[in-house]
Image: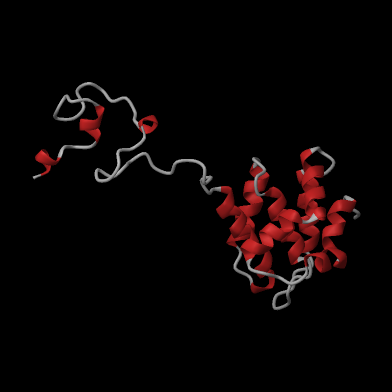
Amino acid sequence: MRLHPLLDRLKGDEFDLAIGFLPAPAALRRLLQRSADVRRVAGALRYGAITEGMIREFVASIVAEFRPGRRLDDDLALAALAVVLELRPTDFAEEYLHDLARLELAEMGTSTAVARECLRCRYAVPKHEARSFVYPSVGPSPPRACWVPLPRDWGDERRGRRAARFPSREGAA
């Protein structure tokens, strides 16, 4: 069965040669993100030229070639699809990434490692967001924008929000 030509390009030797050697999973993920073929597939998926059903059939055709003890020839194509689906907010993308990341097969080591990296990046908190609103009691005072209004009866003393969140040193002894 003939699938979409962009998906077929991921199976070709030309794609493998364009990616070159196989670096660490994080570097390979970034390399695949920059690949023109992967970006074309992502765009076609975004705009509806490729459907998730087509991807499912494509993956089934690749997995049909799996033989225990022999490296899967199109393992890099599965890794490329993991990168394509990394930020896609659908159940299919979630299922694909988790199922691929759970595999512990040496024959598919590249795609499983890239899928794990994609999941790690999918759920990572962006670096520009605050990771905590709790500040230490020693050192410079925290920025006022991070304080939250508290109920009036919160804390032992009624000296304002700072006293409630950062107890005085007299009470610590």
Residue 123, compared with residue 59, is above or below; it is above
Q: How many marks?
A: 0
Q: Nearer the viewer, residue 39 or 74?
A: 39
Looking at the image, the residue that sits furthest to the bottom is: 69
Q: Position of residue 24 (x, y in %)?
A: 63, 68
Q: Position of residue 119 (x, y in %)?
A: 58, 53
Q: What residue is shown at x 67% (from left), y 59% (from top)?
A: 29
Q: Position of residue 154 (x, y in %)?
A: 21, 27
Quadrant of image for the C terminus:
top left
Q: On the image, which quarter does residue 13 sit in?
A: bottom right
Q: On the image, which quarter does residue 72 sit in?
A: bottom right
What colour-coding does the image apply?
secondary structure
Q: Position of residue 84 (x, y in %)?
A: 72, 50
In the drawing, does residue 65 fall left or right of residue 25?
Answer: right
Asked whether residue 50 appears in the rendered view, the answer is yes
Q: What residue is shown at x 51% (from left), y 46% (from top)?
A: 125
Q: Nearer the viewer, residue 147 or 142?
A: 142
Looking at the image, the residue that sits furthest to the front is: 140
In the drawing, does residue 163 fall left or right of residue 149?
Answer: left
Q: What residue is shown at x 73% (from left), y 58% (from top)?
A: 32
Quadrant of image for the N terminus:
bottom right
Residue 147, compared with residue 91, is above or below; it is above
Q: On the image, which quarter does residue 156 sit in?
A: top left
Q: What residue is shown at x 78% (from left), y 53% (from top)?
A: 38
Q: Nearer the viewer, residue 108 or 23?
A: 23
Asked whether residue 63 appears in the rendered view, the answer is no
